[in-house]
Amino acid sequence: MNILGISCYFHDAAAALLQDGRLVAAAEEERFSRIKHDFGFPERAIRFCLARANVSGPDLDYVAFFEKPFIKFERILQTALATVPRSQTVFRKAMTAWMLDKLWVKNRIRDALGIDASRILFAEHHESHAASAFFCSPFDDAAILTVDGVGESATATSGQGHGTSLRLDSEIRFPHSLGLLYSAFTAFLGFEVNEGEYKVMGMAPYGVPRYQDKVWKLVEVGDDGAFALNLDYFSFHYSAERTYTSRFEDLFGPPRRPETPFFTDGSGYPSYFGPRPANYATLAADNQHYADIAASIQVVTEEILLRMVRHACTRAQTTKLCMAGGVALNSVANGRILRETPVTDLYVQPAAGDSGAALGAALFVQHQVLAQPRSFVMEHAYWGADLDQDDIRATATRSGLRHVTCGDESELIDRTVDLLTNGGVIGWAQGEFEWGPRALGHRSIIADPRRADMKDIVNTKIKFREPYRPFAPSVIEERAAEFFDLVGGSHQYPARFMLLVTPVLEQSKSRIPAVTHVDGSARLQTVVQSTNPQYHALIRAFGDASGTPVILNTSFNLRGEPIVNTPAEAFSTFARSEMDALVLDRTIIYKNSK
Ligand SMILES: [Fe+2]
């Protein structure tokens, strides 16, 4: 049985293919189209999934779409009508977009894949999110919590999963949305909505949550986590341009100018920003104010989530929890869930946002609709396209640079460890690319985390990433407890998928300064030998050479670009940066000719 899941037309379009209930391929469209957060119909991702399984459109038993467009359209119409005349512009824009293609997605799928319309099924947005978490998890029974910006009309749901079925029995509806509350602050802090949320999370540790009382004026929450926004402060429900109102600005002051360099006394002034400005102190104080706001919205978001989690687990009478939706990517909140709630086992799959709902829709059809038994647990994130060997050879030859193809894995690892211990910054591409927004050692930039100056070196070499973007430690799972305070154990899946922030142990902070964030935390990746043997071997060998089985890992892309896919794209990124070496499978290309 072949079931293709599709998500698109909002942000992060994707496709995922199940064969007899097991995932065989999944990818976001941006990796192929090279348009960051590409939300268009994911034809390239679909083509990849089908080719990977060697099937064509008519071979598909079902295509599952991640939401119900007509219900969503109805919500948009109702909201627009309720907020006339303020909503005129947003209404006009929505009508155009929906009439042009969003409503006709069934026809688009039928034409693209050549299958009968009766085999195209639609799951609700939050059902897709819920299925993407629960049916990928190893749990037979679990509480389920989905939290995002908005789907059709739900913005958060909770319920439980049991075997091949799940039930969502409570929901919060638009415009009351935790995701949109966070996004309003994302916009206020000068970042792009649906893109800059992780930057708010990264900025928060530089601040003190001194404005919590003000944030609590915007949102009310009950003990059960049910919340309501005070709509006087928001305009996202009737404006296409602004997400918050002038009352919001009365409370928090003027918004931060987009693209303003971020630094505080805590972060210091990175060398790659150039010479220190004459008004450094004023700018640092300004940034501190915004960091304090970021810290405040982050803490309030965590508090609301913690209440929702406690309530969901109490109702489902379990300590196992599956989470999905964009807010489940908040790895700081995930850390607190494991530390401060009764949850003993947390499952979040790597593409917890809307792209992952493509997979969720397919799983929903497989289990909830067709009641097929479960035979799949998502143990790793490597469901994308592999590296093409001809492309590697051609890229190495065309580079005109010194390159070597290693005879075996141990030579590759020896040479790479040598580069790392000598301070090299390396583009590392291996096997299938990752599903979801995190680079997990298949399309990563790696370096030595023991050097405090490595943050600045990497930032400089890969073109000026902002200081609030922390670098992650990849650690072999069996040594994780030596460095990180992992309540709940190193086996937690969010740690495997870099979706968990934990404290770095006091005695280990000085061992890995380049991956320890300003507040002493780290967004770690535990690397498991069985699912990622080569990356595991590399980190272990680096540990043998240095005493520290941890590697600095950041995504293999330049600022504003999607993570690389092919060898040619990896080389292009390598060539436009000052990375020292590029590893493509077993071939190493050196920038320096010596
Ligand atoms: Fe969503």
Image (cartoon, helix red, strand yellow):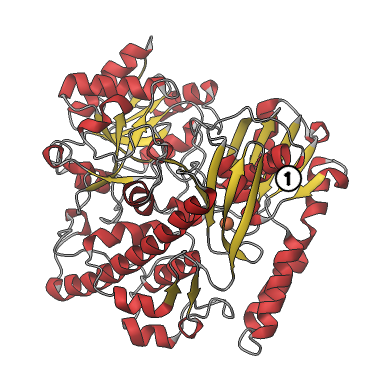
Residue at 39% of width from left, 36% of height from top?
492
How many residues crowd mark 1 within 10 Å: few (<14), some (14–19), many (20+)?
many
Residue at 49% of width from left, 61% of height from top?
194
Residue corresponding to mark 1: 64
The image quadrant that residue 3 belongs to is: top right
Q: Secondary structure at mark 1?
A: strand
In this rendering, would 20 be left or right of 394? right
Q: Amino acid at mark 1?
A: Ala
Q: Is residue 526 above or below residue 417?
A: below
Q: Position of residue 354 (x, y in %)?
A: 57, 52
Task: Let me know if residue 505 appears in the view.
Answer: yes
Q: Ligand 1 lies in which image quarter? A: bottom right
Front position in the image: 583 or 162: 162
Q: Position of residue 461 (x, y in %)?
A: 27, 44
Please identify the quadrant where the C terminus is shown: top left
Q: Is residue 320 above or below residue 279?
A: above
